[in-house]
Amino acid sequence: MSAALVCQISLRNLIKHRRRNLMLFLAILIAVAGVVSMNTLIRGMQYSMAEAAVENLTGHVKVHAQGYRDDPNISHSFALDSDFANEIPTDQLLGWAPRVRLPAVVMSERQTRGIQLVGVDPAREDISFLYDVELTGEGLADLDDQRVLIGRELAAQLETEVGRRLVIITQGGDGLNRERGYRIAGTYNAEGVSLEKVFIFTGINPLQALLETSHVTEVSIRLSDEAATDSALQAMTGFFAQQDVADWQELEPTAAAMFLFADAAIYIWFLLMMSALVFGLINTLIASVMERVKEFGLLRALGMARRLIVAQVVVESTLIMTVGLLIGTACGYGIYLAMQDGIDLSAFAQSTDMLGMSTVLVPRLEISDLVLIGGLSLIMGLFASIYPAVRAVKIEPLEAMRN
Amino acid sequence: MAEHADSSTALGQMGERSGRGGSLYFRIAWRNLWRNKRRTWLTAGGIAFAIFLVSLGMSFQVGSYASMINNATSMYLGQMQISHRDYVEDEKLENTLLGATELQRRLNATFDIAIAPRAQAFALVSVGERSFGGLTVGVDFAAEKQVVNFFRNVNQGELPSSADEVLIGATLARNLGAQLGDELVVLGTAKEGGVAALALTISGTFESGQAELDRTLLFTALETVQNGFELGDELHQFVIRVKDLDRLAQVKAALQSSDILGDGLVVRTWPEYLPELVQSIELDRISAQLMYGVILILVTFSVVNTFLMVVFERTREFGMLLAVGMRPTAIMSQVLIEAALMWLIGVLIGLSLTVGIVGYYAQVGLSIAGMEELSAQFYMDPRIYPGLSADIFLLAPLVLLVGTQFAALFATVRVRRLDPVVALRAN
């Protein structure tokens, strides 16, 4: 007996009970569509958080001078040899930015705050959150710009505005204070206030001049793909043997833990949905077997092999699972497309700021997830058909036909 | 003859009868359930599984929210704060509470609350040649212990024991290059515009896990800040802990309606100054509800399926019942009762599982590997202790009661159109 015949019998049987199989199909569809669309949302959240962590002046890989992380001081700095960029394949390297970043005190006419003063090359900051912030006034022109760019929230706290002056005090390598007045070029509106309160940007050259150094305190390297982090980390550890090289997971442990947590959430969500589904699936398959006791008995009496009886049940389960899976995935994809513009979470702005994610949640579709969901669902379908198949095989021809 | 008439209409009238008729329905329904044991167990198992998942999830939510609220409020900001209306708008030094000592005495005398007074000023903080900006907070260390857990975070040295000692954030200490015993100078602007200068000795450092606090805060005695910044008997906040967090709203209302609080003072509770906590809980609640919704719908579908099979298999039986005069609605209510009984079995199993597991974890707590990193950041305990509340026992069962009844109804509407003659011939 051929496989085609087994499929034919199974298909006929599915169509014969179309009402209940339609219900089963709908349940599979809802479960799959739910899992797929939820998956894209969790992935979207996960990558939004990871990206924010990377853009938060971290980059995928970052080089500090030894000792800087314990004592952020200009004496813990290093001379940057830009040859390092050659160590990373150009197709993996999105960009890199040198910075001088020091804790400092900022004073307006009325208020005083502790902040981080960051000397940057604005042209290179296309790798950090600075490239897409909304500005009031102007951004920094170039690496010689002597003005500062400050967060909107900090400007409010300092009761100051664009065009006014600030005094910033920081320490030089000799341990003595360096105090200088700066004009505010503009204010930036990052999505969350936590960045706005901390970072003040200025041109890197005048800051180095003020500190009487040509060193930088850090180099942040952004890769085009997160997956290249490990190899880039190795290359940089080799190049900057004297310095402290770390990847974003080490520098942003909270974001890294959230990243792993989201991976787990995806499996948990899948497992729960599918277990809820499996009860109905087993139930329907058993009913389908028990209704056909006579038929199976007859087939056995005519000499049909046991494995073909098993095959019928398995094929029936796999058929309905496959159809549900395909259409469910299509529906999930449709939901994903409908959400493509992003879900507005601005009503939860403080919470998303705490989580370090954007206020617009854009779903993210990973083909590998779809393959995984599909594969696991089919395995689940096979698993659900074990017991019904065993029942079918146990049918004794004589007894069955007598009933 | 009369006897015969009576018995022939007995079936038909069952729907209108009460008492004996009702219990007969239940007996028949119960017997019907066990005609196909496996199917009943599988369907009830599905119901039980869904109820178990949803109620277990809800009890862990209740537990973790309670722990988040408790940890967040006892972290630093407290459950309730009293301050001047202007200070809420703008944390300026001059927006103070007047007559603080007398006010605190009267509040303590009238209400059963713990109060921690705080006066705080942004200023330049220097050790040796290094300076940074910091928020100098004058506190009553003994009172703070009754209100928040913040001062358990001392990681080096100890709490200030005299008015010229100071406790500073670990990151601030690192930035300042400061050691225990070093002299620290606070330089700022006093309330009346003069120079405020404090020379303090570092007695300890704290590490709270909240980067912003560790970077900016330093604590010294309340009177040190009041004297140094020319505040007199004024301060900025009373941070308050009520004995029972569930009664927070009542205490707030009582405070507001009492005549102790003068003009311009406002009472705020934690949702007002910890909006991220309210939102996180709300966000989590919404996503969990989404999941519960899908699970409950899935199980409802499998119940629909079960009853489609029930009705299909019993077409002949129904045909016979119709032929002897039973009304379609009576047959349908018969099936609805079967559905309700199946639901009841599922509910009993599901909820007993939940109670068992929740009972166990309420004792020992559930710890998730890798959660330690996140827990401090999101105000959570590394162990989650589930909690119970009435809606945990009600929500999922009630939704599924509606679901199963609806499912049974959907599967049996066909009975109304059933022709007894055709049905009797069905196989």
Image (cartoon, coloured by chain):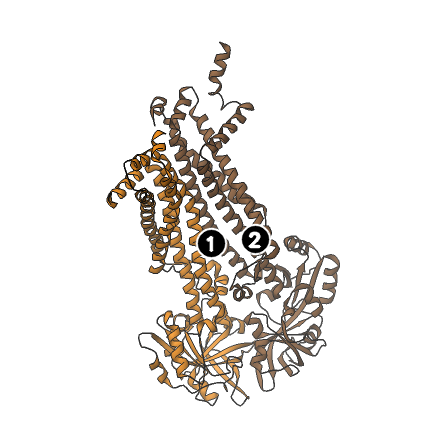
Instruction: Return the residue at label 1.
Output: B287
Q: Quadrant of residue A141?
A: bottom left
Question: In the image, is B49 to the left or to the right of B188?
Answer: left
Output the chain of dot 2: B
Using the image, determine if residue B338 lies above or below residue B73: above
Of marks 1 and 2, which one's residue comes earlier in the chain?
2
Q: Residue at x 49, y 28 (%)?
A: B28
Q: Residue at x 66, y 71 (%)?
A: B119
Q: Circle 2 sits on which residue?
A: B62
Residue B84 or residue A173, whichever sits in front: A173
Q: Which chain is orange?
A: A
Residue at left 42%, top 86%?
A205
**Which residue occupies the foreground of this view, B158 or A180?**
B158
Please name the color used to draw chain B.
brown
Residue found 49% across the figure and 68% down from its top: A254
- Which element is circle 1 on? helix
Separation of disc 1 and disc 2 at Cα? Answer: 15 Å
Q: Is residue B342 above or below residue A152?
A: above
Number of disc labels: 2
* Quadrant holding the C terminus of chain B: top left
Horizontal side, residue A161 vs residue A227: left or right: right
Q: Residues within 10 Å of mark 2 (few under 14, many from 20)?
A: many
Residue B217 appears in the figure: yes
Q: What amino acid is at disc 1?
A: Ser
Q: Position of residue A339 (x, y in %)?
A: 37, 56
The amino acid type, in three-letter code, at marker 2 is: Val
